[in-house]
Each structure stands twice: as structure tokens, then as C-alpha cells.
Image: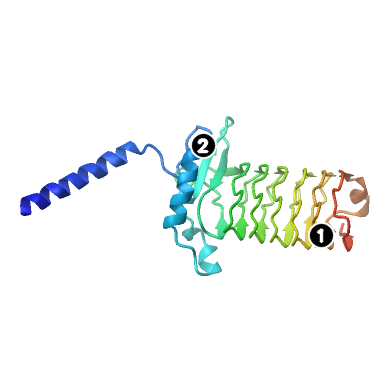
Amino acid sequence: MKKTLTLTAAAAVLLAFISGCARTSSPGSLETAPSIFTSAETETASVTETETGTEPTDETDAGTEETAKASDFVWKRDADGKVWLDAYVGVFSYVAVPATVPETGEEVTGIDAWAFRDNANLKKVVIPEGVTEIGKGAFMYCAALEEVKLPSSLKTLGSQAFYRCESLKTATVPEGVTELDYAQFMLCTSLTEVNLPSTLAKIGDDAFFRCDALVTINFSGGWDKWNAIEFGNNALPQYYHSINCLG
């Protein structure tokens, strides 16, 4: 009996060693390829996190970086060597994106297109300083999303970034952003107030279309700058209560 147990334990160690060698990369690591996952692998990782992850029981626990595992984030490096968050595959509702890749210390400079798309759990996201660009549809269809904190370093918001975020109540676009692209906040039906920067030069087609709850638009520039903005078709909702030019 003792010999049988010894052999079984040795076999288990050998199997674990072989499995470890077979895995060449893991979620949270960073490679120069466009992504560390193929589409199929990303889907598998999401399922695994959903099955094994533990949802935080309160906002305090969920809002700390300690609760976000390295495996919750998929990174990529573009042709210019800049690092992007390619996807969030975790289950937590309150997410603080790391300012640097944990394994390498490289600064995160962008949130890629579709990075959080269709995440049904997401309620609050904090984007760190140093991020200059958020890609197309990054938060599209995040129906439970209530709050996004954008960094002062942000310069570019891709089109449809917050399309149909039906629980989003307020939005503040930082100084330095010059354009709200197509359908930026379209169908954000709970949005009641937005704060727009004085640097804004264009509000594109359908940017706030069907934001029927929007009553207050605060613009940090003066009326001269507001009147100089280029407005696309249906750029603002049909009805809103007031525009406050604060400059």
C-alpha cells in the first residue's frame, strides 16, 4: 500500500510539471503579439473566471486593486510599443484598471476597442492617469455601468464608447478631449448630467441621441466657445433643460 501511494504522488507531480510546460502564457502576462488570447481563448478565460471567481460582497472590497487578480486583465503591445488593456475578463463590478502592467511595470496608455463590451456585472470603472485613448465601443452594452472615472490625461474617445450604457447617470469628459465621436453616449437613457471640457471642438452625429433623461449640460468654456463647436446630426437630445457655460 505504501509503494502504491508513493507511485501515485510521483505521477501527480510529473503530470503537474507537464501541464505547466504546456502552458506558454497566462492571463495578465504581456507579449508583443496583438493579444495573448485568440478569440476562443478569451471566451474560455471569461467562462473560467465566472465559474471560479468570487463576487465581492460590498463596494469597499470590490473597489480595491487587491481584489482584481492579474488574470482579470488581458494586455497587448502595439507596433509603437505602447501598452493597451485589450480586455477585462473578470467578474467584479467595481474595477480599477492598473496604471502599469504588474509583471513588467510598463505604463498602460490605452483602453482598446471593445475592452469591456457586454460586461453585465460592471458598475464602476476607474481609468488611471497615463491613459490617453479609449477605443471604439470600449464600454458598449454595459447595461449596469453607473460610473466611469476618466483621467485628466485622456485625449481621445473612440466612437460609441458608452453606447447603450443604460444605467450611467453622469459623465465628465476631461479637459484635453476635443471631439465626442459618433454615438458616443447614444441611448444612455439614465444620463441626467454631463460635464464637457472647454477644449471640445466637435460633437458628432448622434453623440447624445435618445439620452431622454439628460437635463443639464455643463460646459467649462464660455458661450463663444460653445457656439463655435461643430454639431453633427442629432448631436444633442431633442429636449434638455439647460446648458451652463462656466467659462
Q: Quadrant of the N terminus?
A: bottom left
Which amino acid, mark 1? Asp
At a point 50% along the width and 32% down the height, the residue shown is 33
- In the displayed structure, 218 sits above or below 12; it is below
Choose top left, top right, bottom left or bottom right for residue 213. Answer: bottom right
Choose top left, top right, bottom left or bottom right for residue 210. Answer: bottom right
Question: What colour scheme has been applied to the protein in the rendered image?
Answer: rainbow
Q: Give percent across and percent down for residue 142.
A: 64, 54
Would you say 232 lies left or right of 150 here? right
Q: What number is the disc on residue 212?
A: 1
Q: Is residue 53 visible?
A: yes
Label 1 packing within 10 angstroms: few (<14), some (14-19), many (20+):
some
Q: Secondary structure at mark 1?
A: loop
Which amino acid, mark 2? Ser
- Earlier along the polypeptide chain: callout 1 or callout 2? 2
How far apart marks 1 and 2 lie (CA) works out to 38 Å
- In the displayed structure, 7 sits above or below 53; it is above
Q: Give percent across and percent down for residue 123.
A: 61, 61
Would you say 185 lies left or right of 20 here? right
Q: What number is the disc on residue 110?
A: none
Q: Give percent across and percent down for residue 227.
A: 93, 49
Q: Secondary structure at mark 2?
A: loop
At a point 63% along the width and 41% down the height, the residue shown is 113
The residue most toward the top is: 79
At a point 90% along the width and 54% down the height, the residue shown is 222
Of circles 1 and 2, the one toward us is 1
- Marks 1/2 in contact by CB < 8 Å: the verdict is no
Q: Which residue is mark 2?
A: 35
Q: Give percent across and percent down for residue 206.
A: 81, 47
At a point 51% along the width and 48% down the height, the residue shown is 73
Tell how many labels.
2
Q: Is residue 28 visible?
A: no
